[in-house]
Structures are given as C-alpha cells and as structure tokens.
Image: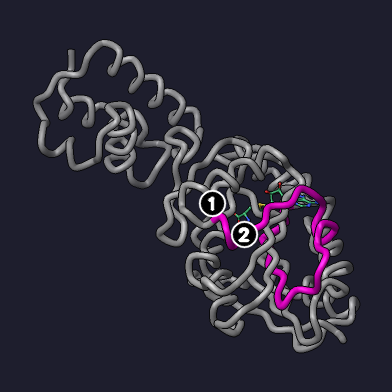
Amino acid sequence: MSSIEEALRSGAQAIADQTDNPQLEAQLLLAFTLEKERAYLYGWPEQALTDLQQSRFLNLLERRQAGEPLAYLTGYKEFWSLPLNITPDVLIPRPETEQLVQLALDLLPQEQCLVADLGTGSGAIALALASERPQWQLTAIDQSSAALQVAEENSRLLGLTTQIEFRLGSWCDPLSSPQHAIISNPPYIAADDPHLHQHGLSFEPASALASGADGLDDIRQISETANACLQADGLLLLEHGYQQQSEVISILKSSGYREIRGYRDDQGQDRFVVASCST
Ligand SMILES: C[S@@+](CC[C@H](N)C(=O)[O-])C[C@H]1O[C@@H](n2cnc3c(N)ncnc32)[C@H](O)[C@@H]1O
C-alpha cells in the first residue's frame, strides 16, 4: 500500500505528458480523493492510502492520462476567485474571460445597471459581475438547460441568487427589457477545426465551442439581435478567437453598431470587441 508521498510521486510521473504542472495536479487529485485540503498532504506524507483511496486515485490518474481536464475530474474551477462547480455540461471557464469581466467593470457605471450574460455556461461571467456590483441586475441566458442548472446551483452556493435571473433560450430571445450592456463569450471555433478533437477540448460540450463553418455564426446572430435589446448607448461586449477580430468588427459595423473597439488579452492576442448600440 503506498503512502501519500509515494502516491504523489508516482501520480505526478503518470500524468507528466498531459500537463505543465504534474506535481500540482497530482496533489489536487489526491486531495480530492481523500476529501481533504491540499495542505493535509504536506502534514501527513507517510499516511498509507486505503485500497479504496488507492483505486480511486488510480482511476483519476488514468482519466487525466487520457486527456480529461482536471476541472471535470474534481468538479471544480476557480474563476474571478469564485469557487465554481463544473460538470461536463459546461465549458471550463478560461482565465482570459476574466478580462472580459474586467472590461465590463471598467466601462459600465457602478450604479444600477441591467446586464445580460448570453451563453452563461457555469455562470462564470454573471456571477463575477454580480459579486463585484451589488447594484446590478443580471440576466444569465443559456440554451442548455443542463448548463443553466449548473449556473443556478453556483449562484445558490455563492449566495448570489437575488441579483441574477436565469433564463433558458437562445441568445437575446428571453430578454424582455432593454439592457445597459450585453456581454457574451459565445462559441467561436470553426466546426471543422481539428483542435476540437484534440487535447481537453474533446471533453467539453461541442455546443459551447463550435459555431458554423468559420466559427462566427453565433457572433453574427448575437450582433444582429443584441442591438434591439440594448438601451440607447448600451454596450455589447464580446469575446472572440484571436484571429477573428477584424471579421467581428466588420460584422458589428454592418449591423450598425458605433464606436467599435478591439481589445487584447494579457497574452497580447486580439480577444475582445466592445461596441455601442446604434440608436
Ligand atoms: C464558450 S461557452 C461560454 C460559457 C461561459 N460564459 C464562460 O465564459 O465560461 C458558450 C455558451 O453558450 C451557450 N450557447 C450556445 N448556443 C447558444 C444559444 N443559441 N443561445 C444561448 N446560449 C448558447 C453554450 O451552451 C455555452 O454554455
């Protein structure tokens, strides 16, 4: 029977090809297996694993070796310092999306605002905004009822239920009143992009990733419909693929938006566009 220390050493070796940080991931998987904080592993390196713990840990390592993302194995991902429950029904929130949240916080007034998060997934964007702006009222929309359940559960766990209304439907369809801002990280990968079948992406819901032949079908739909759901001077904030910015800007121009501006993420990649409603 192996000890915590031995399990961590062999676990890190087993998943070394899948991650840049095998030690940390082995620790997170073992802590998850033992239902303990990671610090416990440092405190009790010689503790022996039971047979059940050992077989659970081995099973997680095998799934990680097969490319399954850590967040689906542990059911957990941090976004904007918020602990989020994650299931395979939702996209694993990415760090660059935190910068979309920051853009919204920088560009919108702090006082009462109506803001819609289209394609909320785990609820990441809506929850981050609600946690920062107690006066905002958010509508979180997704066409996946399974995703919406995860988002609602996250809002309950974080005590952010009163500020967010969750609605099932396609993009702007469920919106009934004009918004100060509409924010979205929609699917934007081309349907035949080989990356969809590689790495961890193949484990994530295709409906959260792929969007037609050029990856822009959903951005076109949002751009066509969001204008009518925004207040005068309301803002549309979109995340997009790093090679899509000029196309996204032309889509928004042809839909009549004004003051269209592109932004880069922390890696220096073109990643976001913000535009004002045409009216
Ligand atoms: C890229 S994921 C973003 C999830 C989350 N906002 C985030 O940033 O982590 C896109 C989300 O859009 C949802 N979606 C796809 N098509 C949609 C549609 N027509 N209407 C509403 N949501 C849609 C998917 O279910 C998925 O949750």
Whole-percent x and y of residue 42? 13, 39
Secondary structure, mark 1, is: helix
Whole-percent x and y of residue 227? 85, 75
Q: Residues within 10 Å of mark 1 (few under 14, many from 20)?
A: many
Q: Which residues are magenta?
A: 161-189
Does 165 sit left or right of 31 as displayed? Answer: right
The colour scheme is one colour
Circle 1: residue type = Ser
Quadrant location of residue 199?
A: top right
Q: Is residue 244 magenta?
A: no
Q: Which mark is residue 164?
A: 2
Circle 2: residue type = Ile
Q: Is residue 202 above or below residue 136?
A: above
Whole-percent x and y of residue 193? 72, 47
* Residue drawn where x is 72% and y is 40% of the image: 145
Q: CB of mark 2 within 8 Å of CB of mark 1?
A: yes
Q: What residue is shown with label 1?
A: 155
Does 188 sit left or right of 175 as displayed? Answer: left
Whole-percent x and y of residue 147? 65, 42
The N terminus lies in which quarter of the figure?
top left
In the rendered image, the residue lying farthest to the front is: 162
Secondary structure, mark 2, is: strand
Mark 2 beta carbon near ligand 1 (under 8 Å): no
Quadrant location of residue 236?
A: bottom right
Q: Residues within 10 Å of mark 2 (few under 14, many from 20)?
A: many
Quadrant location of residue 43?
A: top left
* Nearest to the observer: residue 209 or residue 104: 104
**Which of disc 1 and disc 2 is earlier in sequence?**
1
* Residue drawn where x is 18% and y is 27% of the image: 4
The C terminus lies in which quarter of the figure?
bottom right
Instruction: Name the magenta segment's main secondary structure.
Output: loop
